[in-house]
Every structure is written in C-alpha cells, then in structure tokens.
C-alpha cells in the first residue's frame, strides 16, 4: 500500500509534512482575504455627463456612440449602460474571467478616445473617465457635520479636497467614490422675461460667460530681442483669469449701450454659489452626511486594507473642523473577521475532539500524537492547494 512507504520511512514522512506546512504558510500570506471570492468577470467603467440633458438625450447622443465604439473590444462578454435624468452616463463593460484589467482598461480607453470627437461639445469639456473597478464595496464611510454650521455642499467639498486623495493612495484600495458628488458650482438662474426685454437669448448669455470666464496668457513686455541701447527689462503681464465668486460672475457684461451704460449678468439672472448636482441627498441620524464608498482592489487583503483605511481616517479626523465627525455604517470586514474567528475556533474544537476520541479508544498518548500533528498539517497544506489552483 502507498501509506506503507511513509510508515516504514518516518523521516521521509516528516520531511514531506514540513514541506507541506511551509508551502501552506507561504500561501496564507499570498492569498486574498475578502468577503466573497473573485468569481465575477473583471469590469471596466466608463463615466461622463451631459449637463442639462435628459436621460433620453444623454442616451442617444452620448451612450449610444460610446457603445458602438466600445462594442467588440478584445475579450468582452457584454456591455451595459445607463443614463440618468441629470445627464449622467455610466457604461459597464464585462470581460472574460482571467482578462488582465489593465489591458482591458487601455483597450476601452483607446476606443473611447476615438469616439470622443462625435460627442457633444459639453461632454468633451466634461471629459470621459475610464477606470477599472471591482463592484465589491469594502466599506462606506459617512462624513457628517453640525447642521447648524455646515450644509451638505460644504461637507462634500471638504471630503473632496481633504480626504479622497489620502484614501485613494492606500494600498489595496481600488477606488473611492463620493456618492452624490456635489462639487461647488456657480448657479445662474436666468429670467426669460428680462432676456426678452433686452432682446437677448440664453445662448448670448452662455457665450458671454464663456468668453469672459477664460484663462488667457497675455505674454511679456520687453522680451528679447530689443533695440540696441535700450535697458532690457522683461515684465510678465498678469491678467485676471477665471472668475471665482458671485460678484465677479454678476459683473459679466452682456451688452454695452451707446450711452456708456452696461447690461450685466446680475441684471437678468440670479447668481449664487451652489452645488453642481442636486440629484442625491444623504442623512445620518438626521444630520446631513456625505457617504464615501471604499472599493477593494482586485486580490487585495480586505482586513489589511480596512485597518489601513481606519488608521488614515483617524489621522485625518484630527484635522477636522469643529462639529465634523465620521462613522462607518457599512463594513464588510466584520463578516470576514467573524468567519476567520469561527474557523480558528472550529479547528481548535476539532483537534480537541480528535485527541480525546483517539486516546479514549487507543489508550496510548504516542498513538494519539500522530493524528494530532496530522490535523494541522492537512489544514495548513490545504492553503497551498488553494493557491496553486487559483
């Protein structure tokens, strides 16, 4: 029998057991730790927006051309797109299991860039984002503040400027999504009756804003070559760039009259600093909150990543304004930690019962020692098999 070889050669059996244990220990450090295994196909996400467009318009003018360009990319299984009433377009491309996500992202991006020229001008200005991201949400961090002092827009922009970049740099984090992003934007509410009174159209207002809210490079004075004998002083001309506050936008000139008077934007519209998008709102314990989704990188260790995120948030929280706080209302690693503890507890109970039962029947500690050693060897060696077969 095959087992007789190891019975007659205990040294060989011991060496092979040691090799199995070493292989299992190495595999444990390399295997990912997640709530669910990566059995879903890798995905690439394409995101853009068409401000002011309806879902149907965004679908026809943005999603459809992108789908036609992306369709048929190497190793693609299927493609799914959605358009919201706020003009947001999201396209998910799923690939064959085992496809390199980096190569898939490059292939999709090349096709998106080829189709960008057929997009509306506003979409080209917004840009099209192509990124790889798993659908596995590691945890959700909710940032909230005192409602008497901070609104959702302020909290959102604080997270965008002071938190998101730090979280994205953490090892194991695939992406950080700011749900319902409400970036600061200048909101201009045009009054149609006043436009008609001054014989203007919305396109005239848009053209004036675009022309006067631009960054220019005026150049220099006294730049070489200069006439002989003149003192060579070079001055850089600095001009006002993009407008930054409500007053500057309100002073945009729409029409200049012959009598020296001006028609300004504030005369025909209400200008205010608000959010770019109001389609999403969140509250936590009746307080305005901004949820941030932490997406796990493919193959990353969920527990190590969650610990790193917690350490980073603890450091960032020391710089929070007064009245700010954060919490983690959704955390998938809690299930992972409980599962690991249950596995360890089950192993301990199994070894205890095996030892007691064998000793009860054999009444010999030496004979009991062999299965006691075989149980951890077989369990640890199983991880080597898991790693070898993916």
Image (spheres, rainbow, N blue to C red):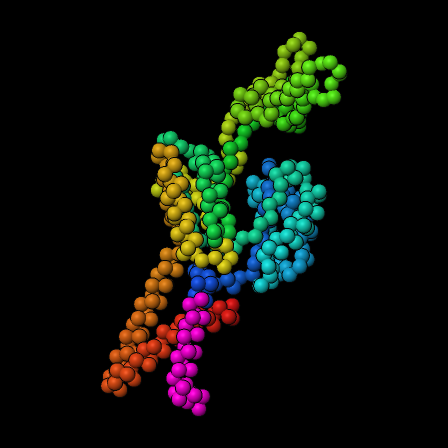
Q: In the picture shown, does residue 237 fall above or below 19?
A: above
Magenta: main secondary structure: helix
Task: Name the residue rendered at 46%, 45% in the picture.
Answer: 167
Q: Nearer the viewer, residue 210 or 362?
A: 362
The quadrant where residue 237 appears: top right
> Who is closer to the viewer here, 201 or 81?
81
How many discs appear? 0
In the rendered image, the quadrant that contains the N terminus is bottom left
Report x, y in % for residue 254: 64, 20
Q: Is residue 124 left or right of residue 357?
A: right
Q: Residue 318, position in %: x, y?
A: 36, 38
Q: Quadrant of residue 303?
A: bottom left
Is residue 14 found inside the magenta-colored segment of the image?
yes
Measured from the top left, where is residue 178 in percent x and y? 48, 43
In this rendered view, identify the residue nearer to me: 235 or 199.
235
Reply yes or no: does residue 177 show up in magenta.
no
Report if residue 305 is visible in the image: yes
Q: Position of residue 325 (x, y in %)?
A: 36, 40
Q: Residue furthest right?
A: 227
Taking the image as drawn, is residue 80 in sight? Answer: no
- Considering every residue shown, the one lying at the far bottom of the view is 1
Q: Residue at x 41, y 75 (%)?
A: 18
Residue range in magenta is: 1-26
Q: Is residue 144 above or below residue 111?
A: above
Residue drawn at the location 73% of the way across and 13% of the way down: 229
Q: Residue at x 53, y 21 (%)?
A: 247
Q: Residue furthest front?
A: 229
Judge by depth and name the residue closer to the eye, 231 or 108.
231
Q: In the displayed structure, does residue 371 sit left or right of residue 49?
A: left
């Amino acid at each position: 029998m095959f087992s007789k070889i190891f019975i007659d050669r205990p040294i060989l059996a011991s060496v092979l057991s040691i090799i199995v244990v070493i292989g299992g220990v190495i595999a444990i450090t390399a295997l990912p730790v997640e709530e669910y295994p990566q059995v879903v196909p890798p995905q690439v996400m394409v995101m853009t927006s068409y401000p002011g467009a309806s879902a149907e318009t965004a679908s026809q003018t943005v999603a459809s051309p992108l789908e036609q360009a992306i369709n048929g990319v190497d190793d693609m299984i299927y493609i799914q797109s959605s358009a919201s009433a706020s003009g947001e377009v999201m396209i998910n491309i799923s690939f064959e299991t085992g496809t390199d996500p980096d190569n898939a992202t490059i292939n999709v991006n090349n096709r998106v860039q080829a189709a960008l020229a057929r997009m509306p001008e506003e979409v080209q200005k917004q840009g099209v984002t192509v990124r790889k991201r798993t659908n596995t949400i590691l945890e959700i961090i909710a940032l909230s503040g005192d409602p008497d002092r901070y609104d959702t827009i302020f909290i959102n922009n604080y997270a965008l400027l002071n938190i998101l970049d730090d979280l994205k740099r953490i090892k194991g984090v695939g992406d950080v999504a700011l749900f319902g992003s409400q970036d600061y934007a200048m909101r201009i509410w045009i009054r149609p009756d006043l436009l008609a009174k001054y014989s203007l159209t919305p396109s005239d207002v848009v053209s004036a804003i675009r022309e006067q809210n631009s960054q220019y490079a005026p150049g220099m004075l006294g730049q070489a070559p200069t006439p002989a004998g003149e003192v060579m002083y070079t001055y850089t001309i600095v001009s006002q760039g993009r407008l930054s506050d409500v007053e500057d936008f309100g002073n945009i000139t729409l029409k200049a009259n012959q009598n020296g008077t001006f028609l300004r934007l504030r005369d025909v519209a209400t200008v205010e600093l608000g959010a770019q998008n109001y389609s999403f709102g969140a509250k936590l314990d009746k307080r305005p909150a901004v949820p941030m989704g932490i997406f796990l990188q493919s193959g990353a260790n969920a527990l190590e990543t969650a610990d790193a995120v917690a350490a980073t948030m603890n450091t960032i929280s020391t710089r929070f304004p007064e009245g700010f706080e954060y919490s983690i209302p959704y955390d998938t690693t809690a299930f992972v930690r409980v599962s690991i503890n249950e596995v360890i507890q089950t192993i301990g109970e199994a070894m205890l019962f095996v030892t007691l039962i064998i000793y009860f029947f054999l009444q010999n500690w030496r004979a009991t020692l062999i299965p006691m050693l075989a149980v951890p060897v077989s369990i640890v060696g199983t991880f080597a098999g898991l790693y070898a077969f993916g």
